[in-house]
Image: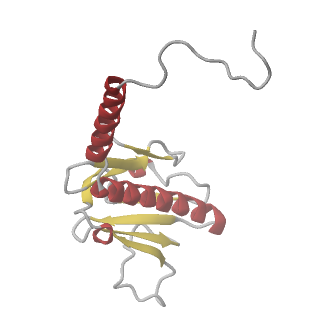
Amino acid sequence: MQHRGQTKIFSGKQGYSMLELMIVLAIIGILGLTINFTYSPADSRLKSAARDLYSHLQKTRLGAVKTSSDWGIIFDNATSEYFVCSNYNADQDCDDNDTFGTRDEIIEARVSLSDYKSGIQFGEITYNPNHVVYEPSGRLKNVGYIGSVDLKNNKETVFNVGTTSLAGVVKITKP
């Protein structure tokens, strides 16, 4: 019988053995090394560039709907840049050489992949010819604008960002 104020004495062993502690520390160490080797600043920069391209494709689509005019993105593989243009005319390129008083096209964003560091550049661009155009309905202008862009870094990690149908839905994948 136990009286008030007394503590119950446990029989058997209390605490952990040295072997159990060493096994837990070994497991934590292995997990730590695995995480350290799979994470890389180059990969996070590539992922950031892919997310930004995804966002710019969405911005282009929504801009076309909002302004009731064609919007487009031009991919310049030579300079590793892309341009988001409003009032886009697919027959004429939107670039910095434009005199903005002569045409209605406006560069809404200019993105240089070199700003992300880690050797990020374009891989395969399946848009023909290197641009994508959304019409005011939010759909792609024609079948030629169904495609994608591969972004890769100096570790040869690749992200693919693109449109899969005339509906203009944008997706991002890591093949």
Which percent across, then down, holds residue 138? 58, 55
Figure quadrant of the N terminus: top right
Q: Image height check: is 84 above or below 16?
A: below
Q: Image height check: is 65 above or below 21?
A: below
Residue at screen point 46% across, 74% down: 109
Residue at screen point 37% across, 24% down: 17
Residue at screen point 44% across, 61% down: 52
Which percent across, then down, holds residue 158? 28, 48
Foreground of the two, 37 or 57: 37
Q: Image height check: is 8 above or below 103?
A: above
Residue at screen point 25% across, 48% down: 157
Foreground of the two, 149 or 101: 149
Which percent across, then down, holds residue 132? 42, 58
Q: Viewed as shown, does residue 109 lie left or right of 121?
A: right
Q: Quadrant of residue 31?
A: top left
Q: Quadrant of residue 68?
A: bottom right
Residue pushed farthest top?
Answer: 1
The way the protein has been coloured in the rendering is: secondary structure
Which percent across, then down, holds residue 99? 41, 89
